Image (tube, rainbow, N blue to C red):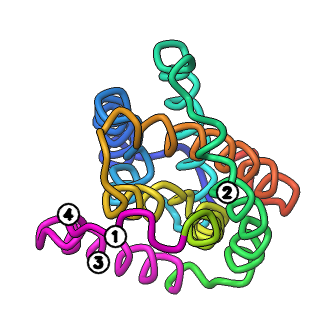
Amino acid sequence: MLTGALDLPALLAVLVGALVAGFTSGFSGFGTALVTSGLWYYALPAPMVPPLVVIAAVAGQLVGLVTVRRSFDWRRTAPFLLGGLIGLPVGVAALSAASPQALKTSVGIFLVAYAALQLTGLARLWVGDWGGRRADAAVGLGGGVLGGFAGLSGPLPLVWLQLRGGPGDRQRATYQPFNLVVLAVAGIGMALSGRVTGEV
């Protein structure tokens, strides 16, 4: 993947991405993958980015775990986790099959779509309890696929929880444990598929 040490601009992009992602994750409980993906795909070979994103996101979630672990709502998180764990192998397999250009393009399209969704306010619509735990599991499935593919497990559950409504603390108590578990398992899956190399 890499032929040698990172040059200074690439190293700065990696460090700035990690710094901004750490701040974002500490503030909101998620966002590491969104921030780092936007910067690291410019500085690093595409195949290196998903495992690095997962490693950084798990590290961020572990740091956050110290302060918010008692508020985790495992019962509410369970259907998301079930779907996420089912979707993970699909995402890891898709990552293994994707070309570097397809990986960059698909992540780029996803980041633009997510930003547009948040900016338009569509994520502030309300669906209440529509679909129940089955809908939560389906959203978790999508998050698991994206987590295994690019380390982007959090955005779909986050948007869905925004649509469900309720206090932000309650939403965070659901999506943060989801991200922690799904990304940790995604990291294991990426390692088993040979993505966590010496260069990474």
Task: Tell me which label, 3 or 1, sits earlier in the chain.
Answer: 3
Front residue of 57 and 88: 88
Q: Is residue 56 magenta?
A: no
Looking at the picture, which amino acid does disc 3 mark? Answer: Ala
Question: How far, Cα to Cα, is label 1 from label 4?
Answer: 10 Å
Which residue is depicted at the point 72% across and 70% down?
87
Q: Give yes or no for contact between labels 2 and 1 (Cβ–Cβ under 8 Å).
A: no
Instruction: Check disc 3: other Cα within 10 Å, few if <14, some if 14-19, many if 20+.
Output: few
Q: Quadrant of residue 140?
A: bottom right
User: Horizontal placement of 78 versus 161: left or right?
Assistant: right
Helix, strand or loop at disc 4?
Answer: helix
How far across and how far down the image is residue 80, in percent? 63, 57
Look at mark 3 in the image and give the residue it sits on.
113
Task: Kindly identify the amino acid type of the residue bearing the numbered disc 4.
Answer: Arg
Counting residues from the start of the chain, the first of labels 3 and 4 encountered is 3
- Pointers 4 and 2 in contact (C-beta within 8 Å): no
Q: Is 82 rendered above or below residue 75?
A: below
The residue that disc 4 covers is: 124
Residue with the mark numbered 2: 79
| 191 versus 102 height, above or below | above
Q: Identify the magenta region.
A: 102-131
Of callouts 2 and 3, which one flags the residue occurring earlier in the amino acid sequence?
A: 2
Q: CA distance from mark 3 to mark 4?
A: 15 Å
At x 54% / y 13%, what residue is drawn?
A: 66
Name the mark nearer the viewer: 3 or 1. 1
Residue 100 placement (x, y as % from top left): 56, 78
Q: Residue reaching furthest left?
A: 120
Give the amino acid at mark 1. Answer: Val
How far, Cα to Cα, is label 2 from label 1? Answer: 17 Å
In percent of the image, x 38 and y 76: which residue is there?
110
- Identify the residue under disc 1: 127
